[in-house]
Image (spheres, helix red, strand yellow):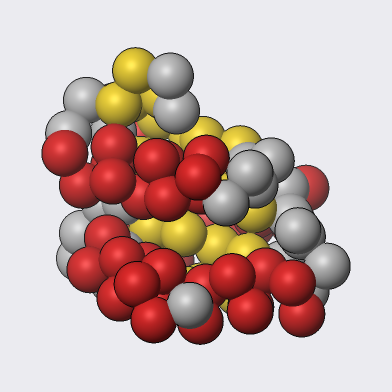
Amino acid sequence: MSTNDKIKNLIKENKVCLFMKGTPDAPQCGFSMTVSNVLKHLKVDFKGINVLDDEDIRQGIKDYSDWPTIPQLYINEEFIGGCDIVKELFDSGELKKVLEKKKII
């Protein structure tokens, strides 16, 4: 299975999928911790994918989304964005609305 197919499957199999450095319980960068904490605060059940465990996934997700940084958040297979975008959406209340509209929370 290609890296691209692995990434597609992870995104398809998990309603909320966060490609991050570290794990939700032990983030290994501040940006990953911020997005993880936002999702926890909203009581979202999400899958954290530790890109540090797999160099192919780490580079592959950047190619897949055409987005240069990690973390990357996907909700119902839709790319939402990285830390700054997720934080802005959270601060404005939009993230909660998106999660409610997609019946995640």
Image x and y of residue 30, in percent = 16, 39
Q: Is residue 74 visible?
A: yes
Q: Which residue does the image show at 28% across and 46% down from the upper left? A: 34
- The image shows residue 36 at horizontal and vertical percentages of 41, 41
For image coordinates 22% across by 68% down, the residue present is 84
Residue 52 position (above or below residue 86):
above
Screen quadrant of the C terminus: bottom right
Question: Which of 104/77 is in front?
Answer: 104
Residue 46 found in image quarter: top right
Residue 87 sits in quarter: bottom left
**Of the pair 15 and 44, the residue shown nearer to us:** 44
Q: In this rendering, does residue 58 appear at all?
A: no
Lateral position of residue 104 relative to residue 59, left or right: right
Q: Residue furthest right?
A: 103
Q: Residue at position x 69%, y 41% from top?
A: 45
User: Where's the N terminus, which quadrant?
Assistant: top right
Identified at 34% across, 72% down, the residue is 91
Q: In the figure, is residue 5 to the left or right of 92?
A: right
Residue 77 coordinates in the image, percent (x, y): 67, 68
